[in-house]
Amino acid sequence: MSSEGVNTGRRRFLLATTSVVGATGAAFAAIPFIKSWQPSAKAQAVGAPVTVDVSKLERGQMVAVQWRGKAIGILRRTQAMLDGLPDLRDRLRDPDSEVIEQQPDYAKNEFRSSNPEYLVLVINCTHLGCVPQVIPQPGSFNWEQNWPGGFFCPCHKSKFDLAGRVFKGVPAPTNLAVPPHSFVTNNTLIIGVSPEGAA
């Protein structure tokens, strides 16, 4: 076959143009595929810190929020609630919260909180994960003569005090966990972020 009538310049141009168009098409086709590898906005939000305005929380009142798929309870304690905590030591399984990973270092205290007035807990029972109810008033249960108030799990009757510490003789093996949290102002709490400089 004779190559006398072939325009090599035109052939190179068509080859280059086809290559550029093909590469561009492949790039556009790859974008949705690559984006599918990235987590969705919903998945990113699940692990993100949660900001809570606690200014309207009355003393003795609790509010619940979600963080990383867990129920987080924020209880604003009264002075009477705080004053009653030391009296329960003999009735608690782990009064000093010595089991590792129950709370961050800055919450390893009698109140299990970075700010004694506010208790921040993962309110999933450490037995089977039910959500305990907060019963802030002493004598709220007629079957419990010495009930000091606290958290009561309706599934298997585990009880915790108003610092989330588990009572002896109940199915729950450990205290309720304290998540990382910090106050950026007196009324703004961030769950999922430790105070600056804290471990």
Image (cartoon, rainbow, N blue to C red):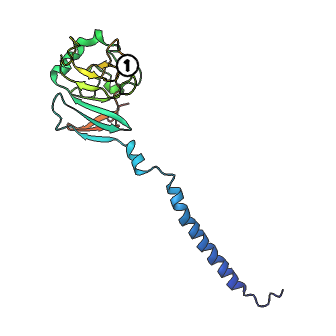
The residue that mark 1 highlights is 172
Q: Nearer the viewer, residue 128 or 59?
A: 128
Q: Nearer the viewer, residue 55 or 136?
A: 136
Do we see residue 43 in this rendering? yes
The x and y percentages for residue 180 are: 34, 33
Q: Quadrant of residue 63?
A: top left
Residue plotted at (53% across, 56% down): 34
Residue that lies at the very extreme toward the right in this rendered image: 1
Q: Quadrant of residue 64?
A: top left
Residue plotted at (30% across, 26% down): 132
The x and y percentages for residue 19 are: 63, 73
Do we see residue 194 in this rendering? no
Q: Nearer the viewer, residue 11 or 68?
A: 68
Q: Residues within 10 Å of mark 1 (few under 14, many from 20)?
A: many
Residue plotted at (52% across, 61% down): 31
Q: Quadrant of the N terminus?
A: bottom right
* Residue 31 left/right relative to 141: right
* Residue 153 left/right relative to 78: right
The x and y percentages for residue 120 are: 28, 30
Q: Nearer the viewer, residue 182 or 24?
A: 24
* Residue 97 left/right relative to 9: left
Residue type highlighted by circle 1: Ala
Q: Quadrant of residue 14?
A: bottom right
Q: Is residue 85 above or below residue 32?
A: above
